[in-house]
Image (cartoon, rainbow, N blue to C red):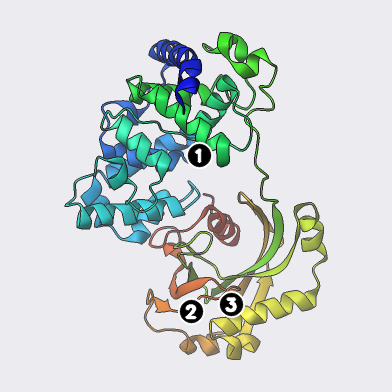
Amino acid sequence: MDRRDIQNDDENCRYFWSNLGDWFAVCKRDLPWRNAPSPYEVWVSELMLQQTQVSTVLPYYERWMKRFPDIHALASSDIDDVLGAWAGLGYYRRARYLHAGAQYIASQCGGVFPSTIEALRKIPGVGDYTSGAIASFAFGQNVPAIDGNAERVFSRFFGIEGDMTRGASRKRLVELADYVAKLGDAANINQAVMDLGASLCSRVAQCNLCPLADRCHAQIYGKTESLPQKSKRIEKTGEYYIALMLTDGDNCLMARRSSGALLGGLWQFPMVRVARTKVSDIRACAESARDTNIHLARHRLFEYFGYISMIDDINIESLPQNVEHIFTHIHMIVRLDRAYISPAKHDALPSALDTVVPTTPTQEFPYDAYTWTSCANIGKKYAISSLMKKLHGMATKRPY
C-alpha cells in the first residue's frame, strides 16, 4: 500500500478498528477456545471450524479435547482413533492434518508449538489464515487472520471488487487487513471481524444493526448483494454406486480408502461407480440403470478383492432403498447389495479376523487395505464416514 493509499484509508481503518472493537466488547460470542487459549486449542478449533458451523463444532471440540488434550496425546494416537473421533464432522483431511501436524511438532519442534508466522506455516495443513489465527489469538501478535468472513466484511466495507482470492483484489485485502491488525489488539479485532461476518454481515446482510454501516461502501452504494464477488464454483456431479456388504452372517469385508482419496483413511463396504451424470439427472439414472451395467460393476468388485471364483456360491440380495449422500461437489446415490458367502466356501475366507491386508489403490477402487471383521466392530474398531453409517444402518436396521 503506497503512502497516498495509506493516507486515504487511515481514517476508515481507524473507524473500522474502533467501532468493531466496541461492538465486539458487547456482542462477543462465548466460545471455549476463546478463554486464554493455548496454541493447540486455537489450532484444533480453527481446523474444525473450516467450512463448518460453530454449533456443529462445539460438541466435537469438547470431546476432542478430552480425548486428545495436548500435542503429545494426539501425536501418539493411532490415525484410526483420530479419524474415529472426527467421524461425522466431514472433510476428513482436516483430521489427518491435525494428526500429521502433531507428529511434526512433537518430532521437529520438541513438542513446543512454534510462535512465528514462518514457523507455523511449516506445520502440515497450516496456511496463511490458520497461522495468522494462532499467532494473534494464542501469541498476541498483531497480524491479520483472513477467512471467508473476513473477505466478506473487508470487501463490503472498503468496496474491494474482483476475485478476493487472487490478483490485485487479494493484494488490496491483505494490505488493509494488515494495516488494521497493526493498529493493535489484533486478537480481538480478528475475532470481531469473524463474528460480524458470521452474523450481521453474512450472505444476507443486516445493515441496520451493523456497527460499520455509516461508512460501509456496500451499504452506501447498494452493493451488499454483489460484494464480495464470487469466483466460479465447481459444478456438482451426480454419481451412482453399488456398495457390497460381503458377509458370512457374523463378519464382513471392509475396505480402507487411501489417504489421497475422498474420505481417505476411513473404512467402508467396498463400492464401485456404475454411472456419472448431471446432478439433475442422477435419480433418473439410478432408477434406469441397466442390469448388465450393475452386474459388470459387481463382478469388478469381486475380482479386485480376489473373490471372483466364489461368485457362483454367493447369494446376493439388493436392499430395496438406495442411500443418498451429498458432498460439496458430488451428489451420490448408493445401492447396497448384501452378499452372503455359502457355508461350503467359508473356509476360503481368512481364518484370522482383523488382519489388515494391503492392496494397491486404483482410480476405480481407491483402497489401500481391506480386512474381515465382526459386523459388531463397524463404527467402533474401524472409523467410518457418515455415508457408511447410513449404509450400515440400512443393512442392519441399526440407527445412528
Q: Could one spot residue 34 in this view of the protein? A: yes
Tags 1 and 2 touching, CB below 8 Å: no
Q: Between disc 3 and disc 2, whose residue precedes?
A: 3
How far across and down, in percent of the image, does residue 20 sit?
45, 15
Tag 2 secondary structure:
loop
Q: Residue at x 35, y 31 (%)?
A: 143
Q: Is residue 381 left or right of residue 210?
A: left
188 lies above or below 379 = above
Q: Residue at x 21, y 51 (%)?
A: 72
Q: Nearer the viewer, residue 308 or 53?
A: 53
229 lies above or below 357 = above
How far across and down, in percent of the image, does residue 335 sit?
68, 64
Q: Which mark is residue 234?
A: none
Q: Between disc 1 and disc 2, whose residue precedes?
A: 1
The local crowd at label 3, few if under 14, some if 14 to 19, many if 20 or more residues have their Cα within 10 Å, is: some
Q: Could one spot residue 63 in this view of the protein? A: no
Image label count: 3
When asked about the image quadrant of residue 190, the answer is top left
Q: Is residue 392 left or right of residue 274?
A: left
The residue that label 2 is drawn on is 360
Amino acid bearing label 2: Thr
The residue that label 1 is drawn on is 52
Q: Nearer the viewer, residue 395 or 189?
A: 189
Rounded to the nearest whole Å, what is the CA distance between mark 1 and mark 2? 33 Å
Q: Is residue 118 left or right of residue 178?
A: left
How far across and down, in percent of the image, does residue 14 sit?
43, 13
398 lies above or below 289 = above
Rounded to the nearest whole Å, what is the CA distance between mark 3 and mark 2? 25 Å
Q: Residue at x 41, y 29 (%)?
A: 178
Q: Between disc 1 and disc 3, whose residue precedes?
A: 1
The residue that label 3 is drawn on is 340
